[in-house]
Structures are given as structure tokens and as C-alpha cells.
Amino acid sequence: MGKKTVIISSVVIIAVFAIFFCVVLFAGNINTRSGKYRSIFLTGNETWDEVKEILKKDSLLYSETSFDMALGMIGRDKYPQCGRFDMEPGLGNRDFINRVAYGLANKTPLEIRLARYTTKVAAGLSRQLLADSASIYDYLMQDSVLDSYGLEAKNSLAMFVRFKDRIRWCASPEEVAACIRRNYDRFWTSDRLAKAKACGLTPAEVHVLASIVEEETNNNEDRRMVAGVYMNRLKRGMPLQACPTARYAAGDFTLDRILAKHTRIDSEYNTYRNKGLPPGPIRIPTDASMDAVLNFVRHDYLYFCANPDFSGTHVYSRTFSQHRKVAAQYRRELDKRGIR
């Protein structure tokens, strides 16, 4: 065999191996289906074989063989890391393996929505993250964390504002708490803090009052009027007599109609029995509801009742006799509609 033939043969063999090597490492092997991004969540305790099984279970591999070969070439001396790993269409073995091995994880969405108890908030967060609800709750309820907000256990719900953010799926409870704080500070700007002070309320008290106002009406402008009534009653030392607090005291959030028996429930949250604000929020209010309190309408009304036309607004009264007439109309309409 001539020298030239040997050289050509060697070049061909090298080229074949190079092409094979490139195909194994770089050719798209992640089947995301229909050009969509897919994600897998790893705790960091998996082996590569377990990672492969996760991919297989969701039919995310075009070729198990090429994946195994790529692992043999570059992955066996590395270990899968914890995190959410997004996979785009056409992702090759090399990029996927390096992404997982070096912990190049994507942040995952984190959201706080409606919740009535801090335990429920922790449970909701844990469903979105690796951390369990008990570890999140225990961290948030530490004295050092509560003190940083000026809160106690009984009003701990006031540390939360509703938000949508992104965070590491493997985030520690400390990181989760930092995310919660960041969004709290986002809402509580110097302007809003100044408004709260002008209202004679602490941020925690704004949360409490806003949580009540929010349950009274879905109409943002109406909320400002309702907040004005409650501010008037607070200033006069009158009990708020807020139906949402009686519902909270009853523990039945499906109640459409608050009856006399509900207003008599012995609970520190029941503002029919106790003057002033309840000890803590009865839910996490929206930003809009807190702004309604901070920007309450200044008027001289002391009473309000749901509008008998069921428009979602309220009728406001200055005297109890005026209020009784509207309330009687509303009760008749409830009876007519079969709302018990």
C-alpha cells in the first residue's frame, strides 16, 4: 500500500470518527416535541442513569445509545446538580450534560396569591420549589425574620404581598425569605410608607384593613369608599362590624350571608365583638386593595350595605336609621334570590 493511500485512509478514518464524535455530542438528541421548551427538575441526588430514565419516561430522548456514548465521553466523572433545567428544541447531548453537570439551571416561577394563613403560604411555596413547607414556615417564623418586619406570629401574614417572581428551584428557605422581602420592599416604597403614616397606620395595619376591604367588594373605586368608612369608625372608636371578619371567625369562607349567630362568635378576629382592627390580616390583599386603603376617600359616612341591585357596589349612609332601611331592602332581595 502506497504512502499516499495510507494518508488518505487515515484522513478518512479520522474524519469518520470526527463526524461520529460530533454527531454524538452536538446533534440534537432532546425530543421536546412540537418545537416547545421542556423542563426537568433534579434534586442533585440522581445518578446519570436515573437522569436518563427521567428523560426516557417523558419520551425526551431520540437516541438512548448516543446519550450513553456522550456520557462515556464527557459525563461519567461529573455529577448531576440540583435545579430546573430547561431544554430547547435541538439541544444536543454535550450541552445538556454540561448544563446538568455544572448546575446551569434555570430559575423557576414563584408566585404568592390568595392565602389566609402563613402555613398555607408555606405550603403553596413548597409546591413550587424543592424545599418542604415545614422548613419554609419554620424559617419565616423565626423571631429575627418577624422582627425585621415589625411583626409577631399572630400577624405574620402581613409580611406577604402578592407577587410573581423567579427563583432557583433548589432555593433554600433563606433564599425564599429574601425573595419575599424583596417583593415586600418593592410594594412598600417611601411614598406608600409616607401615606400609611399620614393615615395613622403601620404597614401591618394597612395589610389588615386592606384584607377586610378586599372581601367587601371587587370594585377598586368602591374599595376606597369602604376604606373611608372603616377609617371613620376607627377614629371614632366604633367597632368595624365587618362581615368578612365574622366569616373568618366562623372558618367557613363559603358563607354568602352573615347571620346574627356569626356576629356572636367569640374570636379576636370578629369585629362585631371587638373594637379596632383584628390582630392580623384575614387574607393576603392585592396591591390594589392596599392602595385603596392608602388612598381612601375622605367622607363622613359611617355605614355601608351591599347595593340591593346586586351591582357589586355599596350604598353609604351617615346614620344608622338610613343604613337600616338599605339593609332591610338588601335582606329582602337575598330572600327573594334564595340566598340563605
Image (cartoon, grey):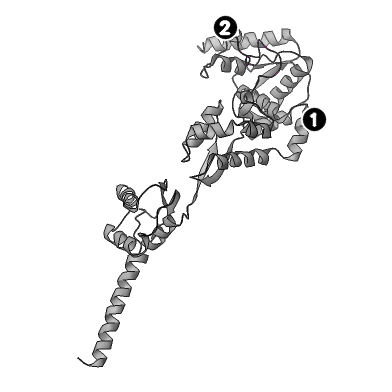
Residue 248 visible somewhere in the drawing: yes
* Residue wearing tag 1: 198
Q: Which SS class for mark 2? A: helix
Give the answer, above or below, for where 284 lies relative to 163: above
Within 10 Å of the Cα at label 1, are there few (<14), some (14-19), or many (20+) other Cα atoms? few
Is there CB contact under 8 Å for labels 1 and 2?
A: no
- Residue extending farthest to the left is 1
Indicate the amino acid at tag 1.
Ala
Residue extent of the magenta highlight: 265-277
Q: Residue at x 63, y 14 (%)?
A: 268
Give the answer, above or below, for where 211 lies relative to 178: above
Which label was assigned to residue 136? Answer: none
Closer to us: 190 or 326: 190
Which label was assigned to residue 261? Answer: 2
Q: Position of residue 197 (x, y in %)?
A: 78, 31
Q: Position of residue 85 (x, y in %)?
A: 44, 51
Q: Is residue 274 magenta?
A: yes
Q: Residue at x 37, y 60 (%)?
A: 75
Going by the image, does 285 lie left or right of 190?
left
- Residue extending farthest to the front is 77
